[in-house]
Amino acid sequence: MDVRLNKKIKVSSEYDVVVAGGGMAGFCAAVAASRQGAKTLIIEHFAILGGLGSSGGVGNFDGRLEGAGNIFDEVVAKMRALDAMEKTGSKFDHNVLPIVLQKIALDSKVKLLFHTDCVEVIRKKKTITHLIVFNRSGFSAIKAKVIIDATGEGVVSQFAGAEILDKDKIKELIPPSMMFFMRDIGKTCLQKQISSKYIYKTKDDIPMLTPWWEPDGKVGIKFKIIGHDTGSGEGLSNAEIEAREKVLPLVKYFQENYKPTYKFDYTASILGIREGRRIKGEYVLKGTDLFAGKKFEDVIAVGTFQTDAGDPKTDKRVYIKGGATKVPPYHIPFRSLKVKDLDNLLVAGRCLSADRIAMSSARVMATASMIGHSAGAAAALAIRTKKKLRELNIEKLQNMLTKDKMDLLL
Ligand SMILES: Cc1cc2nc3c(=O)[nH]c(=O)nc-3n(C[C@H](O)[C@H](O)[C@H](O)COP(=O)(O)OP(=O)(O)OC[C@H]3O[C@@H](n4cnc5c(N)ncnc54)[C@H](O)[C@@H]3O)c2cc1C
């Protein structure tokens, strides 16, 4: 039996731009909007910015690091100045990233609301008037002129009734991975076990283990989890539980077979979700567009990273067709950010309007940052010029982005 929640909710604040989700895409979106003069808020479920780049332990910026815009440039420069990122490479310390992002966001006058979930929207015809959020103060409503859904999972778009792409394939998403971390203590330190149904003896038993070696005797290791709908509450919870049950047995396997002096340190706070709900926009970017290096007149970001779509049915290193393919630089059009049939909602980051293969490339953090930056600039431009997102002068937007040191390969 269903129940109905009938509740009067207080409108707690009003913003020009509200960004749901403070991952790399949401962070860049908010900073871009705020620097263009829009009163901007980030609503974030966790207490830190960076999304998978921090909470997920994914300490490596893929995609083209140059020309990704001055906000991303600033992140890289600050991380390097703190010795928290390789001087010429792309690996970084995921524990330092949220401190740097927070500083840039606050210096850019972005308001941050942590420990807060977007749980519903109020929609009038094609416009979202309010986001309903929940945190320690209970429910409240936040009024917004433009909303950017950077939740990775497209949750705000779903609440607003947007169409989800490939809805029938939701049980078969690109597998997520858990990251765990170990460090060399210079003496053998075999991991003690708690009783577990997971016992790993040979290479055939284990999921794909990908180590990310660090120069200072540390290693991050990721392994895949399959068979859960991580876009559902229970599915995500079960996937997290399974992942942590597997960690210590895998630590043991790693020590016994590779590095007996590496001690288990910690796991990432959350499972790393590669694919969530992708939202239908005015254009669905396709894998074939990437392979052809397609150019669009309304380009607002450029992707360069290879596709990376693991087979949902296995935790081994197996890819779906076209899922591990190099691509030439390709355009991401503004239409893939504009949610279909909604006037004031943009998607940014991995919930972009793209097919699975295209998303598997466009989701990497340098590209997600570009998409976010462009979404924020577009939102501010719409507000300043009193236009709907679909009426925006794209050339004006592109000029703003070029001024912000974004190389759009026009
Ligand atoms: C295992 C793994 C390895 C990867 N390796 C690399 C790599 O080497 N290099 C690379 O560049 N990329 C890599 N990626 C991809 C990359 O990390 C992500 O695609 C990228 O970080 C996505 O950024 P985002 O901002 O779109 O989403 P996310 O980082 O997922 O951020 C979304 C944010 O929204 C918040 N949120 C969600 N729902 C709500 C809600 N209802 N209310 C409030 N807040 C909400 C979340 O807490 C989160 O902080 C990897 C991904 C995985 C999983």
Image: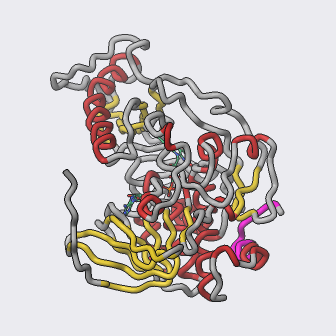
Question: Does any portion of residue 219 appear in the rendered image?
Answer: no
- 81 vs 391, left or right, is left
Q: Residue visible at 33% across and 12% down?
A: 201
Secondary structure predominantly adopted by residues drawn in magenta? loop
Q: Nearer the viewer, residue 170 or 134?
A: 170
Q: Position of residue 348 (x, y in %)?
A: 56, 61
Q: Residue visible at 60% across and 28% down?
A: 320
Q: Nearer the viewer, residue 166 or 137?
A: 166
Residue 164 lies in magenta, yes or no?
no
Q: Residue visible at 32% across and 37% down?
A: 239
Question: Magenta segment range?
Answer: 400-409
Q: Residue visible at 61% across and 59% down?
A: 281
Q: How many marks?
A: 0
Q: Residue furthest left?
A: 195
Residue 403 lies in magenta, yes or no?
yes
Q: Quadrant of residue 192?
A: top left
Q: Nearer the viewer, residue 95 or 327?
A: 327
Q: Quadrant of residue 35?
A: bottom right
